[in-house]
Image (spheres, grey):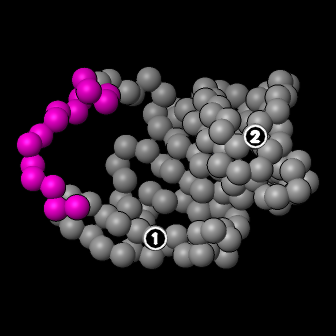
Amino acid sequence: MSTIKIIDKGEKFTHAQIDNFSHFEGKEFLKDATEATSCEISLGTLPQGAAVPFFHNHKENEENYIIISGSGKFQIDTEVFDISAGSVIRVATGCDRNLKCTSQEPMTYLCIQAKENSLGNYTMTDGTITERPSLL
Ligand code: ZN
């Protein structure tokens, strides 16, 4: 089972590390570790033949699933489609969802959960290029 460790924390950031990331198993929620305020991010893995043990839906939050490795099936209500590494799936509120790994290798995925219709400005309508000297 993986755990998250806080590596460093400043006034404006939290740096956390998932132990044994390349062999991560199970499900880990990241918001509490990083103290994120805009979304919940979870990392999950499913071994071959496994699905999340329940369907669920959300009242206020949409979810965006990003498949990192492996492949399988995704079900939204009664609709089923194939997914694989690189698939990005947005799921709206008010519908049931689940995913199942059908590949030999485990399916690893991120799920980003944020309030539906909450996104205003983003990328360059929110960001500003600054002139800070690089210390990298
Ligand atoms: Zn969910």
| Spatial separation of the CA atoms under disc 2 and disc 1 | 25 Å
Q: Secondary structure at mark 2?
A: strand
The kind of secondary structure element at disc 1 is strand
Task: Left or right? Give the position of 51 relative to 44.
Answer: right
Q: Is residue 13 above or below residue 130?
A: below
Quarter of the image where the N terminus is located? bottom right
Picture residue at 44% right of the left edge, 57% below the top: 31
Left or right of 35 in this view: 84: right
Quadrant hosting residue 128 = top left
Labelled disc at residue 128: none
Choose between 135 and 77: the one closer to the eye. 135
- The residue labelled by disc 2 is 84
Q: Quick one: label 2 or label 1, which is nearer the N terminus?
A: 1
Identity of the residue drawn at 55% across and 32% down:
62
Among the 4 quarters of the image, the one containing residue 84: top right
Q: Nearer the viewer, residue 99 or 84?
A: 84
Mark 1 Cα within 10 Å, few/some/many (few <14, many 20+)? some
Mark 2: which amino acid?
Answer: Ser
Q: Name the spot of residue 113 as percent of width and height, x first.
A: 52, 41
Residue beneath label 1, please? 17
Give the quarter of the figure containing the C terminus.
Answer: bottom left
The residue positioned 88% from the left and 56% from the top of the image is 104
Q: Would you place residue 109 above or below residue 78 in this image?
A: below
Q: Are marks 2 and 1 in contact (CB under 8 Å)?
A: no
Mark 2 CB lies closer than 8 A to ligand 1: no
